[in-house]
Amino acid sequence: MLSRLMTRREQGVLLFVGLAIVAGALSLYWYRSAQMPAQPPAGIASPVAETPPAPAPSVLPIPEVVPPLPAAPPEIELAVSVAGAVRKPGLYRLDGDPRVQDALDAAGGLSDEADVSDINLAAKIIDGTTLSIPTRAEAGGFPDGQSAAAINPPGYTIRGWQDDAEVAVDASPVASEAPEPGGAAQINLQTATQEQLETLPGIGPKLAASILQYREEHGFATVDDLKEVSGIGDKRFEAVLPFVHVE
């Protein structure tokens, strides 16, 4: 009956369309099958891809902190004038903790006529001072017969250092009780006893004994004769002068 309703041409077109639909469905099926992964048979587990281990975190070395070196203390420079019996008298600048011997070395050493018998070679140099080296007595010494102790700071000479040490030892409350200047209680150098002399400022047992010895050998014509006693310099004489007299 269908053949009666359609012509042969129409039947051919219909058949062509049906075949095209079937071909398209088959192509779609094959395309999708190619895209899907193959499924393992039932009962067999699919292999699980191993995840590569995560890389260990890199550890950077911690830089070592080196504390800065302390700054070197600045060296102290002292200036001293070296005079007298040395080979190269003049002004010298010395670093560190210089001593008298260092100053003499800087000045080229001692001359042939130098006399250092009273020089304290270990004394520390005092900034801005003069170190004077006398000559031997037979070579004339310094003008006016000045001794090493008279022309140098006390610390530069043995005698000056001893005198300073003696002043420190002799200082006592008794010395502060000396008579007032010009008073009737002034000490007569011609008749004073050891105990009386020890009450004078800066006069201890050793110096008091030296005064008595000088009086026995020479006597005191005036108070100024006291400066002839060994160990009594200008400063000590000025301190004692108001408290003594000579009759």
Image (cartoon, helix red, strand yellow):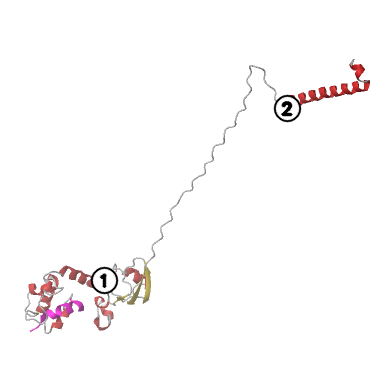
Q: Nearer the viewer, mark 2 or mark 1?
A: 2
Q: Any magenta on residue 243?
A: yes
Pointer 2 residue: 35
Task: Specify the principal SS of the magenta part.
Answer: helix
Q: Is residue 35 above or below residue 194?
A: above
Q: Quadrant of residue 50?
A: top right
Residue 76 at what x, y percent from top left? 37, 67
- Which image quarter holds the C terminus? bottom left
Q: Quadrant of residue 234?
A: bottom left
Left-right relation of 95 to 172: right
Residue 101 at what x, y percent from top left? 32, 69
Q: Quadrant of residue 142?
A: bottom left
- For this orientation, the residue located farthest to the right is 8
Left-right relation of 133 to 73: left
Residue 7 at what x, y percent from top left? 93, 20
Pointer 1 residue: 155
Q: Is residue 84 above or below residue 100?
A: below
Instruction: Answer whether residue 209 is visible to the viewer in this image.
Output: no
Magenta segment: 232-247
Left-right relation of 47 to 122: right
The residue closer to the viewer here, 40 or 239, is: 40
Q: Image point 85% across, 24% down: which residue?
A: 17
Element type at mark 2: helix
Q: Which mark is residue 52?
A: none
Q: Residues within 10 Å of mark 2 (few under 14, many from 20)?
A: few
The residue closer to the viewer here, 164 or 230, is: 164
State how far apart marks 2 and 1 are (Cα): 111 Å
Amino acid, disc 1 = Gly
